[in-house]
């Protein structure tokens, strides 16, 4: 039986208005989940709640067997460093550094060794010596993903990871993410507007009318 990596229970949150309430879902080892919905529905906020960056106003997140927001800050910081990987639509790389230096920062902090096969799989091994500013947008995003995966996270949270990519590069990126999940028994939650991307995941949820409903 697969181990539970993350469990969201009765999550509710609001800013000026209510975003969502009564959110429940479970993520298992080796599983991928897509969350779809209209812009402004709260998808990114829910992702940030699950990934330790926003404490929900109601409910709890069980992450790797612990009640996340009941834990001390030091524990949460450790989880972020070693167990969680965040992929954004924009790469947030260090522009003054080379592609390889960007990735090495992540591996150093996580006490991991870079797998050269990952760079080859993402088709970026030949640009590692170049400055980030010299790379195309697609190359920058793939370096960003390599930086995340090189730390060997147990959970990956991806917020529109293919939003700025052409269809061929988007397909490559998603293939690599799903391969990683399968190989390492990790979990993936991806927020996307692309139903083709969502269809590749084991489960798809839609955030609509302040509720999260499973659609696949």
Image: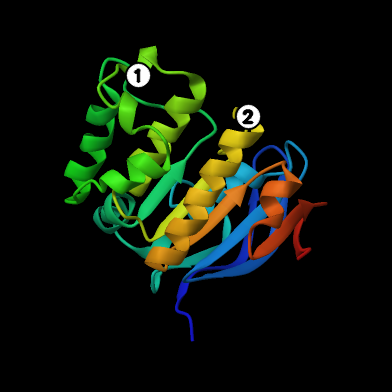
Residue 61 is situated, as x and y percent measured from the top left of the image, at 50, 64
SS at badge 1: helix
Residue 2 is situated, as x and y percent measured from the top left of the image, at 48, 80
At horizontal 62% and vertical 61% (from top left) the residue drawn is 11
The quadrant holding residue 144 is top left
Q: Is residue 38 left or right of residue 26?
A: right
Q: Is residue 5 above or below residue 190?
A: below
Q: Tell which tag, 1 or 2, sits nearer the viewer.
A: 2
Q: Which residue is label 2 attached to?
A: 166
Label 2 Cα crowd, 10 Å radius (few <14 / some 14-19 / many 20+):
few
Q: Is residue 172 above or below residue 21?
A: above
Assess whether mark 2 and mark 1 are in contact (beta carbons under 8 angstroms): no
Q: Is residue 129 above or below residue 186?
A: above
Would residue 30 be seen by someone viewing this image from the given angle? yes
Determine the residue located farthest toward the right in the rendered image: 209
Residue 127 is situated, as x and y percent measured from the top left of the image, at 33, 24
Distance Cα–Cα, label 1 vs label 2: 19 Å
Q: Is residue 29 left or right of residue 150?
A: right
Q: Which of 11 and 173 lies nearest the eye of the viewer? A: 173
The quadrant holding residue 17 is top right
């Amino acid at each position: 039986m697969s181990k539970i990596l993350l469990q969201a229970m009765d999550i509710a949150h609001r800013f000026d208005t209510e975003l969502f309430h009564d959110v429940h879902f479970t993520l298992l080892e080796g599983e991928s989940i897509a969350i779809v919905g209209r812009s402004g529905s709260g998808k990114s906020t829910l992702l940030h709640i699950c990934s330790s960056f926003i404490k929900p106003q109601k409910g709890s997140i069980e992450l790797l067997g612990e009640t996340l927001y009941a834990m001390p800050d030091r524990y949460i910081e450790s989880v972020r460093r070693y167990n969680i990987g965040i992929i954004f639509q924009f790469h947030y790389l260090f522009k003054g550094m080379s592609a390889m230096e960007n990735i090495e920062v992540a591996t150093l902090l996580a006490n991991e060794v870079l797998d050269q096969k990952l760079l080859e799989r993402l088709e970026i091994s030949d640009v590692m010596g170049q400055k980030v500013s010299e790379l195309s947008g697609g190359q920058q995003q793939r370096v960003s993903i390599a930086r995340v995966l090189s730390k060997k996270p147990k959970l990956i949270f991806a917020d529109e990871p293919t939003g700025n990519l052409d269809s061929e590069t988007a397909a490559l990126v998603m293939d690599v993410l799903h391969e990683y999940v399968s190989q390492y028994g990790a979990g993936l939650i991806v927020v996307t507007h692309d139903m083709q991307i969502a269809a590749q995941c084991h489960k798809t949820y839609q955030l609509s009318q302040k509720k999260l409903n499973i659609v696949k």
